[in-house]
């Protein structure tokens, strides 16, 4: 009887229990086909590993009508895109490339998963960019620079013999959202990456990724010929150096025939480069490009170069690269961070976009949240990505958005590409915070189709990752969509930038003034708060960075009256009592922004707690826990910034606002034991 | 010119600057007489040190009419009270005792300071209690048990030769509010206190205090005869023991002819006592009382006794002392803590009050905030003191308030007295928190006249200590008056008690369950939370502590429907879903109480910040800083208690409420490095 009652109890409770979920499935939570699909309902010709994967996915998860996969060379103009046409009996997916067919399969599985009608499809998909790439800042010792989800996925010590099942899971996840390229290692590259033993390890990964349509790239250290090859230098015009690279390329392509190419960070933050030998960035890039050209490889050359000169750091990439326009080979693409400083919560867009008229340009986004609360803070980044892509540079007149400049619409670029610094590590849930998965997802979806809205992507992701219950979907979507602006509010509103604690970039350190260090690594260099006001004067009276923007932006940004308020402290040194559009003084506005940020995070906590009935216990609790950290951090940021800036403004924090709960002096003493990497 | 401009600047800024204030002046901030008063306008007869002090105070600070000080034996019935009569030319202060004249002088100085009319006075003041005493829990090594304002004022190593000026300042402050007695040392008394060398030090303090009308008392260790005298035991019926005490008393009174008597903590928390020899508390107290009697000394015998028996700790003092009623000498007074547990933020009153019908009873309050956030939290205690004094015990029918039982109204007590455990240390501002001075002040004023309202006292204190500007006075008074209830809300609302962290009693530790230790020192003993509900059942179905209260209180407290909700968990184990008067469930009510506490402290922060224009920079900043701690601690308490109790209630925290920002497991790990003493 006792046993019977126990079973009865378990039976009754069962529907109330959720299975523990660790998030390892990402958004790939296709409902298992109850009966399965019979093999004869999947029609395809030829044997190809990519098609085999596509068929396996269908066998495992497809629950609908017959599907035919057609390779059609006539669809070449879609690149690795595809078409899908259907009636209630059959779906035909057609593509020029096998990877296109695989993408098409993931497309219909997504439709099934999000409960869309699949009986009248007439879809044509062409990717916005050719090279849709994740840049991993993973080091050979297993650490990740700016990694917040555990150590590196790549187990270099185990490779090439021992192979983690996660390599293929990773490739599958990327393929499911259209990512087709991967830089395996940190841009602060170890020369060892090019050692033969490491290349053999790389080959194993490339072989696993290839059927998923993914090419492997490597970051290379410009000094590799000297360090690794024992040459007298690494001068790009030195024949021996060229020969070394030629032989290295030959070795790589023998192992990996479809190797993508090199990513290079040169003459920046202590990295070696062509300027060490009096050569230009173009000299360096072209040397490599010439060597990779016969193999179809490309060089992605980073424009993130700046030195501790007197010149405003925000201007330096433009000053450095514009004179080189037209000098780069056509298989070089200059990789430009979205903003001219460094992945801040909000930046003005990088004025280099559109300024290189004869050079291929690609955007570099950061998916990992180096400056946005690591994996502790819930920040949905699609709105940030979109903000950049939709920014109008006016380089060819109105409508010259960064999207159109980089995707080939406005310029017949030889190569189009777009990069995101990955937020992926060995954590079970891949990205540390369950919601950070959405940023990986959103990057993939956006670089496939940059016209998707942030909301559409969030909608898809929530339905696939959690549930399509409206009671969950709507509030959670609202939280995601506002989350980036919330984080800007509590971290650095109104165009403030780079007032982070040194090194780890987690908490606030607006008082940071590293005497004897590089001034451009000190927060005070960026906010320039003083008795008169706050902000970096980049107008004609200051660094004149506004002059790097095409008209009318130089005028708009240069005039405090027309400059968008969310960038006002980026471009202007603004008096504390300056009257903002809403009638508040700048000081009051700053106070209210920080306070709004805090309040919004607390609202997210409330919102999430209400979601408990709709989500499994493990993910519910883990997200809840990170939101607590975010709420505490938001107060930390608010108190640190307001108490510090108040020492200049000498004005009271408006009394409607919740008061600081910390002492400025205590906050100054906080030294977090955080490294740059995980 | 430069110098001139500098002086000009200083001159212009001068009115804006407040002098830094360290709070050392307490409420004794009499405006300095601009011209002084001529000596002939102060009329008095005879030379007496107390009258000399009174005259000096008048000379220094009085700015009004002529004053005559008259010693009148006919006013003996006023004890050390006084009368004040005035017209516009003259004020006559009359008293039987010189100390009464000094009190009268402080009275008129207070009237002057608070800008009251002094031209038509007709005042008669008789103190509510004879013995108005501060109990210092100061140890001979300079530490203070439960001291939060630095180490002890008493510099035992320096005495008797080196004399701190603060001894006299302390006496003056006490005299100004009518305190006339002081126990110098901790109730957990060192036998060394009675060593000859220490008595010589005590004599010096007694000599300094005497002109201010203050008598010195000592806490004594019951084992002193054995430990100090080398006797075989300390049995109160042992003739050798009695002889030892007799000789010790003789020695004391030779040094200090007006020595007040002894305070004894016996057979409690490990202290020795008469029960060690099979004797009763009465045996012990009477032995000492007989010896002190010839000198006019008294014995204050603490009722705070309890042992780790199965009996509810809240019942033990009553069980122990009621059988002894009638057996105590008439110079013994039983000192009873306001509540039956231990100075909690809110307790039901101690049922021993009124239960000893033939024995003098005195209340022991705690001014130092052992259980109320130390000196970090702003908590004005007058409402707590008043709540006890106004509690009706019904011991002689309706109207038998604790005030009337202890002040001699209802019983012709031989001695009346009232004690407060001091919150005073060597900090410059005496009490750590500037607002804790108000508790010293309020205790003094209330024990002089327990009919004063909390508001009247706060009003006086604010005017004297800060300003009478209505813009400051009204909001700050409001803050003070609500502050104790606020602290109850965020620490332990609804009758919860003793869920503090072990030892230091600062933060929350509701999960505390000290296996192997005394169960009555574990928080779980007190809250008894389980799946059904929370609270200590003290009704007939539980410990039946309610039976110790006189009718109708036993019925009122014993019935969950009539029990005041602010004590409901003190007397009842209440189901989580029990419906409270406002329609909320108990769980919801608990959540809202904690949240209200947090919100109120944040409101105090806002309120205080607005007071900046009315208060000197130093005190403004120091109070602001402590309020920040209080705000953080309130959130800590709320999160700890709600998250912990939620593991039993299994109910969501109402979603209107700000969410916890801590993890329960993290809070459990907090181990503060706080000692019992300062």
Image: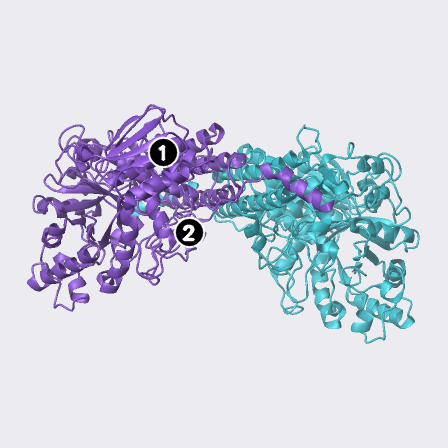
Chain colours: A cyan, B purple
Mark 1 element type:
helix
> Dot 2: what SS?
loop
Q: CA distance from mark 1 to mark 2?
A: 38 Å
Q: In the image, is residue A576 above or below residue A425?
A: above
Image height check: is A93 above or below A580?
Answer: below
Q: Any mark on residue B41, and which?
A: 1
Pick the quarter of the image with the C terminus of chain B: bottom left
User: Looking at the rendering, in which quadrant would you find the N terminus of chain B?
Assistant: top right
In-image side of B406 versus B655 (left or right): left
Tell me if mark 1 has few (under 14), some (14-19) or many (20+) residues whose alpha carbon lies within 10 angstroms of its own.
Answer: some
Which image quadrant for residue A463? Answer: top right
Residue B524 x %, y %: 30, 49
Residue B623 location, x and y as percent?
A: 47, 42
Task: Give x and y (percent) for residue A36.
Answer: 58, 46
Left or right of residue B154: residue A424: right
Please state which of residues A36 and B112 is positioned toward the viewer in this rendering.
Answer: B112
Toward which corner of the image does residue A297 lie, by quadrant?
A: bottom right
B18 and A19: which one is in front?
A: B18
Q: Which sits earlier in the primary sequence, circle 1 or circle 2? A: 1
Q: Nearer the viewer, residue A564 or B44?
A: B44
Tag 1 subunit: B
- Circles 1 and 2 on the same chain: yes
In the image, taking residue A632 as reference, residue B673 lies left or right, namely left
Question: On the picture, is B667 further left or further right than A146?
Answer: left
> Residue A401: horizontal and vertical position, in percent?
81, 39
- The correct choice, above or below, for A410 with respect to B453 in the image is below
Q: Which mark is residue B427?
A: 2
């Amino acid at each position: 009887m006792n046993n019977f009652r126990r079973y009865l109890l378990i039976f009754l409770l069962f529907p109330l229990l959720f299975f523990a979920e660790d998030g390892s499935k990402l958004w790939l939570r296709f409902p298992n086909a109850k009966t399965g699909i019979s093999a004869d309902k999947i029609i395809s010709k030829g044997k190809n590993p990519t098609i085999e994967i596509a068929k396996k996915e269908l066998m495992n998860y497809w629950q609908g009508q017959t599907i035919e996969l057609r390779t059609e060379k006539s669809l070449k103009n879609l690149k690795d895109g595809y078409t899908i046409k259907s009636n209630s009996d059959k779906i035909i997916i057609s593509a020029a490339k096998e990877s296109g067919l695989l993408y098409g399969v993931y497309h219909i599985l997504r439709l099934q998963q999000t409960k869309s009608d699949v009986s009248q499809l007439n879809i044509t998909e062409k990717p916005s960019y050719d090279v849709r790439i994740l840049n991993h800042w993973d080091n050979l010792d297993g650490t990740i620079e700016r990694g917040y989800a555990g150590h590196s996925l790549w187990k270099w010590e185990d490779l090439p013999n021992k192979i983690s099942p996660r390599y293929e899971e990773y490739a599958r996840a990327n393929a499911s959202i259209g990512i087709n390229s991967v830089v395996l290692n940190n841009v602060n590259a170890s020369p060892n990456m090019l050692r033969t033993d490491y290349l053999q390890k790389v080959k194993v990964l490339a072989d696993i990724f290839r059927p998923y349509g993914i090419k492997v790239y490597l970051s290379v250290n410009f000094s590799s010929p000297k360090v690794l090859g024992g040459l007298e230098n690494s001068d790009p015009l030195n024949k021996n150096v060229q020969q070394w690279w030629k032989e290295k390329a030959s070795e790589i392509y023998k192992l990996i025939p479809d190797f993508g190419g090199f990513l290079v960070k040169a003459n920046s933050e202590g990295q070696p480069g062509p300027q060490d030998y009096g050569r230009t960035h173009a000299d360096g890039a072209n040397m490599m490009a010439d060597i990779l050209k016969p193999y179809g490889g490309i060089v992605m050359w980073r424009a993130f170069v700046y030195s501790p000169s007197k010149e405003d750091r925000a201007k330096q990439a433009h000053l450095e690269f514009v004179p080189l326009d037209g000098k780069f080979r056509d298989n070089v693409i200059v990789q430009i961070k979205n903003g001219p400083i460094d992945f801040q919560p909000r930046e003005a867009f990088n004025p280099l976009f559109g300024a290189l008229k004869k050079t291929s340009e690609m955007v570099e986004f950061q998916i990992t949240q180096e400056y946005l609360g690591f994996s502790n803070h819930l920040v949905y980044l699609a709105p940030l990505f979109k903000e950049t892509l939709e920014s109008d540079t006016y380089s060819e007149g109105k409508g010259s958005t960064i999207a159109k400049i980089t995707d080939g619409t406005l310029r017949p670029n030889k190569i189009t590409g777009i990069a995101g610094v990955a937020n992926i590590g060995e954590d079970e849930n891949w990205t540390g915070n369950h919601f950070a998965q959405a940023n990986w997802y959103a990057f993939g979806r956006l670089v496939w189709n940059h016209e998707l809205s942030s909301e559409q992507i969030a909608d898809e992701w929530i339905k696939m990752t959690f549930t399509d219950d409206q009671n969950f979907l709507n509030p959670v979507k609202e939280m995601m969509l506002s989350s980036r602006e919330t984080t800007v509010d509590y971290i650095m509103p109104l165009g403030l930038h780079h007032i982070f604690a040194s090194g780890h970039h987690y908490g606030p350190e607006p008082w940071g003034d590293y005497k004897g260090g590089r001034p451009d690594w000190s927060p005070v260099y960026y906010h320039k708060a003083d008795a008169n006001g706050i902000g970096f004067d980049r107008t004609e009276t200051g660094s004149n960075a506004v002059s790097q923007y095409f008209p009318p932006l130089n005028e708009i940004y240069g005039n405090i009256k027309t400059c968008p308020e969310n960038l006002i402290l980026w471009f202007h040194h603004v008096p504390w009592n300056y009257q903002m559009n809403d009638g508040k003084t700048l000081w009051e506005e700053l106070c209210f922004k920080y306070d709004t940020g805090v309040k919004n995070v607390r609202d997210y906590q409330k919102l999430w707690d209400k979601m408990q009935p709709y989500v499994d216990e493990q993910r519910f609790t883990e997200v809840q826990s990170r939101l607590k950290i975010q709420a505490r951090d938001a107060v930390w940021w608010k108190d640190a910034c307001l108490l510090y800036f108040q020492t200049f403004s000498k004005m009271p924090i408006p009394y409607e606002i919740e008061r600081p709960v910390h002492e400025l002096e205590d906050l100054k003493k906080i030294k977090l034991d955080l490294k740059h990497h995980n």
